[in-house]
Amino acid sequence: MKKLICLFSVILFIAFLTSCSLDQAKPFETDGFGMGTVISQKLYGRNARRAADEVWGKIHYLEGLMAINAAGGDVNRLNEHAGQGYIALCPETVTVLQSAIKIAGLSGGAFDITVGPVVKCWNIGADSPAIPAEAELKQLITLLGYQDVHIDADRNCAALARAGQMVDLGGIAKGYAGDAVREIYQKQGIRSALVNLGGNVVALGKRPDGKPWSIGIQNPRAANGKYIGIVQAADQAVVTAGDYQRYFEKNGKRYHHIIDPRTGRPAASGLMSVTVVAGSSTDADALSTAAFVLGLDQGMQLIKRYGQAEAIFITTDNKIYVTEGLQGLFTFKDETGEFTYVENR
Ligand code: AMP
Ligand code: MG
């Protein structure tokens, strides 16, 4: 009997050790395509594979709801009913619309999901994009205005006030997906994970060795994966909006995908990228796009006004500025020698 108890204790002890070390073991990693971008997951823990599978399901579900071209999806139906009153939507779409309107108000309309008609006109990312005529853009920007997105959250309904208006959630949906992924990880008992949705990174917890995650900040003019610095993050979203993510060039000029709603043209605010670090991935996504439109000074003010975010700005003259709260967490590391880190401004 004594022997049996002894053996049982040993087995229990080994099981305990195994469960401890499982979190430390090799991560489960998976890459795939969704929401128009490459998505990679790195998870530690026993349920890693199950959690990652659930994430893929969720991503494709959200894509179906929120992609502008997903036939029968929420955004598609909302746009088709523009000017025709309220329609019922899924609660998650309503949540994203509310977050979008919040950041639109905070940014004075620099972030504006009603850019749909202008985005469609530019068709950046397509095979043969063309530069629209000034008159056409002038006409189209009269359709813009986030105040025309009416939301009845209690009934999960929304409406677009005027015919021809079009919502495009491209600047916030991946951010929302990042928050949704984190929720799945937490539900599955994962304590340490990193998900990257095409530049929208969410770090869950710390690395298994107890250190914060190191997240590379892309050099906006170098190949994918070449960094100008590293930011340390734990339990935070690190989201970048940049002029290198989707663009075309004509006559030596770059036409990228972030639109200034005031002009209907790619924002020319003197920035190449803005990275926002915040608890909410949804807000970080919208804020990064907004700050990109606003430029360095007003973008910095926006981040301050929001109150719970930090940011890294890279200007078109190759200077890097970071908000105060990030200064100890950002390491400037530029192999090209082309960038300057401006520590105090
Ligand atoms: P992001 O990559 O998060 O900066 O978002 C860029 C995407 O958001 C674009 O591809 C458009 O679909 C959409 N977008 C462009 N300009 C704006 C804007 N000013 N406000 C909101 N969404 C925008
Ligand atoms: Mg964004």
Image (cartoon, rainbow, N blue to C red):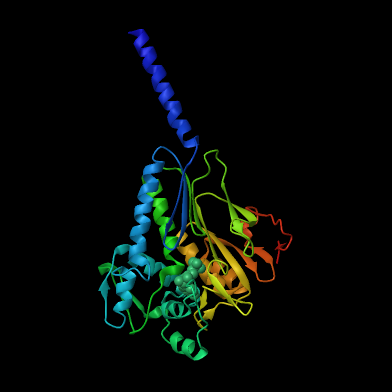
Q: Which quadrant is home to the N terminus?
A: top left
Q: Quadrant of residue 61?
A: bottom left
Q: Is residue 225 left or right of residue 170?
A: right
Residue 104 appears in the picture as rendered:
yes
At x 48%, y 77%, the residue is 109
Residue 189 appears in the picture as rendered:
no
Relative image position of residue 35 (x, y in whole percent): 41, 62
Q: Quadrant of residue 46?
A: top left
Residue nearer the viewer, 14 or 245: 245
Relative image position of residue 339 (x, y in whole percent): 71, 63
Residue nearer the viewer, 279 or 129: 129
At x 34%, y 71%, the residue is 75
At x 36%, y 66%, the residue is 66
Q: Which quadrant is home to the C terminus?
A: bottom right
Residue nearer the viewer, 52 or 325: 52
Give the residue furthest to the front.
127
Relative image position of residue 77 (x, y in whole percent): 29, 73
Relative image position of residue 157 (x, y in whole percent): 28, 71
Give the residue furthest to the right.
337
